[in-house]
Image (cartoon, coloured by chain):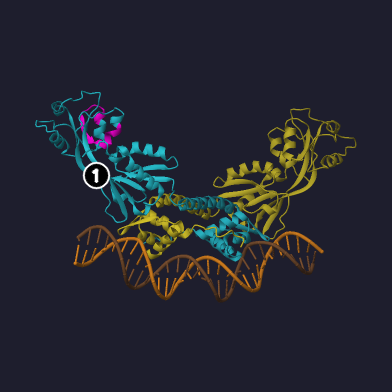
Chain colours: A yellow, B cyan, C orange, D brown
Amino acid sequence: MAQPDRPFRTPLNAVRAFECAARLLSYTRAAEELGVTQGAVSRQIATLESYIGQPLFRRIGRGIALTFAGERYAAEVRDALAILESASARIMRRPDESVLIVGATAIASRWLIGRLAEFQRAHRALSVHLRDVTSTAELHGIDIAVLSEAAREPSLESLEILRERLIPVCSPATDVPQTHDALAEGTLLHLTAYPDAWANWFAAAEFKGAYGFAGPVFDDVALAIEAAIQGQGIAIAPAHAVETDIESGRLLAPFPISVSSGRRYHLAWPKAKGRLQKVRLFRDFILAAPAVGRLDKT
Amino acid sequence: MAQPDRPFRTPLNAVRAFECAARLLSYTRAAEELGVTQGAVSRQIATLESYIGQPLFRRIGRGIALTFAGERYAAEVRDALAILESASARIMRRPDESVLIVGATAIASRWLIGRLAEFQRAHRALSVHLRDVTSTAELHGIDIAVLSEAAREPSLESLEILRERLIPVCSPATDVPQTHDALAEGTLLHLTAYPDAWANWFAAAEFKGAYGFAGPVFDDVALAIEAAIQGQGIAIAPAHAVETDIESGRLLAPFPISVSSGRRYHLAWPKAKGRLQKVRLFRDFILAAPAVGRLDKT
DNA sequence: ACAATTCATGAGATTTTCTCATATTATAAC
DNA sequence: GTTATAATATGAGAAAATCTCATGAATTGT
């Protein structure tokens, strides 16, 4: 009823029989290849010809030859079926044991990247793909992920790996604040995601004075860090996210005081994949990484 | 038995159902589009997934979404099916009324080409394809042909259009023979296809002397004509084949005497196509062409 | 002329696919 | 929460497509 009429569809199995017969120029041999009788092939092709509305083969004597139209059709059909079969063949190769797909939030990626390089070095046989993932709901197709939430669904497992702490950082190339007063007078970079960060930090530092509320506010943590690197001010950033920048000297943490953001990062993975060696290797590697808690003294 | 085992073949109809469901992201709507029930689609896709060995859709709540593998597979499948459907669509457009496929032997083509241009000009709506054909047995896919044999098969019709005559020709740039004696002394180009041509010609010219038997022999009439054009000697060629060369001044026929080769050219066409306007137009055009008999005084 | 090979076809068996009815699962509204 | 709703999954039998078998017809090669 919903259909205009009948949106005639090419009879696909007949097309396959045709492709085979066109290639072998023989119904009999096509039948062999397809594992059916010659009569079946004959019928299939008759079906296709009647659908097409014209002969695809000329019957010459006891053999067959393609008509011009058939010749052309055969070429196109061959292409299409080749695409199909190769697509099937590829997808049928089960997800490789040697490819590990790791998911992570944007901020966690910042920290992960350094780790991944190390992991990669330790397990050259594995190739690691990093994919953006925000929540445990997006874990399909992913072997294991670093997220700021624990897994609640019963099909997932997770382990806490890091309690996020925030720490002030700035470029070593700028006027690095040496005192809390100097800091309070500097340009403070704020993060939408952590609105109370600076307040909490100054409280933790037992600083009583006023400080720069008016600094720029960033929605994107990575952008704030980038701004700090470029010397545009002092950011208060997740310690794990600036770890590599500090190591490389692009950033400096002028004060040892850090505050908790409340976020806890977890490794999360589908239970079904927990037993895969590649997943276990990665999980063990991350848990064993000495750096996990380095800047993370609660 | 001949088969190694089973050369597993992608279940094509399941693939089609998948393509549809992947596009609409709904079994229910796919079922509507395919004109079957939802359950049928569900089963088809289950079949495909079990063939593929992995899920193509994720069942999320009351809906479905493609898995990563499914996403990729869908894209490839879509391409393949599109090729298939468009190939079918094209072939199903019956052979166009606006395309005339003309067959001709190599030598007849030489004469036809000039005519075709004229025909083309007279019927701009038609596009004409010229295809090499040697005998009436090769007429499939051809609307009408010029051949040196009449049609014997009952499915064909034919009409004589030209009795081939042979006439001496040479390049105007060379020493053009003015007398029969001069001709007899010149380099005569012989044709395998017409071994007695020169003998017959000299007989017709009532020439009694000796003449150059020793000239080069050509298997290919076109090559002999080309040789004559290049001034390598005097060829005795089918008048119709050199008509345009004479008109353009590239060749010269020094003597008005011609002899019959015995060959008679015919227009031949499948009876089934005799009624098509494009075929009738061409047939009438050829028959009416004033030039057909011009060099053909028996 | 005859044997062998090949495609075509009728009749019935077989297999696949579809429908119908119902179960299952998840969302959305109350 | 509970219920209504909307989607996919599935069991059983019906329907349809497909295949096999047997045979016919046409052609080639001996």
- Nearest the eye: A217 or B283: B283
- Number of numbered discs present? 1
The answer to whether residue A35 of the structure is visible from this angle is no
Location of the N terminus of chain A (image quadrant): bottom right
Residue depicted at x 68% and y 61%: B62
Residue A78 percent location from the top left of the image: 44, 51
Q: In terms of depth relative to the viewer, which is nearer, A65 or A280?
A: A65
Q: What's the chain of the residue with tag 1?
A: B
Find residue A207 and report its horizontal and vertical position in percent. Answer: 88, 37
Please give left or right for residue C12 compared with residue A263 in the image. left
Q: Is residue B242 magenta?
A: yes
Tell me the residue that label 1 is attached to. Answer: B264
- Asked which quadrant contains residue D19, the reply is bottom left
- In the rendering, at what x and y percent does residue B294 appear? 27, 36
In this view, the residue farthest toward the right is A208
Q: Tell me, yes or no, if residue A218 can be seen here.
A: yes
Q: Amino acid at mark 1?
A: Arg
Q: Looking at the picture, how far across and down is residue B225, in whole percent? A: 25, 33
| Neighbourhood count class around disc 1 (C-alpha, 10 Å): few under 14, some 14–19, many 20 upward | some
Quarter of the rendering containing residue A221: top right
Q: Is residue B184 above or below residue B44?
A: above
Q: Which residues make up the magenta segment?
A: B227-244
